[in-house]
Amino acid sequence: MRKITTSEQKNIIGSRIRQLRMARKLTQDELAARLQVNGYNFSKLTILRIELGKRLVTYQTDANGQPV
């Protein structure tokens, strides 16, 4: 397994999340609040790090193969 260094991007969806957030005219705070209402523990800082590619984003599925 290859180690991810700090200079490498840790996710490939950060820029897409930013595009979608901005298209919906949401701030990072507003997106974080919406995620928190739905049970996700995301802060403005978490959103920022994801958008910048500095935070690892994983894809998880349930037992039926559906995204969680």
Image (cartoon, grey):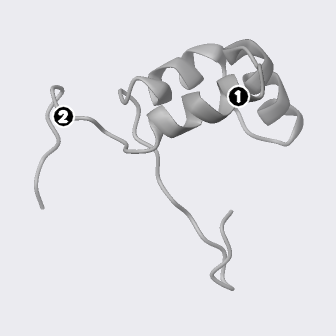
Compare residues 50 and 3 and report the one nearer the observer.
Answer: 50
> Split into 4 quadrants, where in the image is the C terminus?
bottom right
Q: The residue tagged with tag 2: helix, strand or loop?
A: loop
Seen from this angle, which residue lies furthest right? 37
Instruction: Name the side, left or right, on which 1 lies relative to 68.
Output: left
Mark closest to the chain's N terminus, 2 or 1: 2
What residue is shown with label 1? 23
- Identify which residue is drawn at 31% across, 39% down: 10
Picture disc at residue 31:
none
Work out whether residue 42 can be spotted.
no
| Whole-number angstrom distance, CA of label 2 to CA of label 1 | 27 Å
Dot 1 alpha-carbon crowd within 10 angstroms: few under 14, some 14 to 19, many 20 or more: few
Mark 2 vs mark 1, foreground winner is: 1
Which image quadrant: the N terminus?
bottom left
Front residue (pair 42, 15):
15
Q: Which residue is mark 2?
A: 8
Q: The residue under label 1 is which amino acid type? A: Ala
Q: Is residue 2 left or right of residue 32?
A: left
Q: Is residue 12 above or below residue 5?
A: below
Q: Is residue 19 above or below residue 59?
A: above
- Placement of 41 over or under 12, stated as above or below: above
The image position of residue 58, as x and y in percent, is 47, 53
Left or right, 40 with reference to 57: right
Residue at 64%, 15% in the rendered image: 44
Element assignment for label 1: helix
Q: In the displayed structure, does residue 63 sit left or right of residue 60? A: right
Mark 2: which amino acid?
A: Glu
The residue lying at 46 percent from left, 35 percent from top is 14
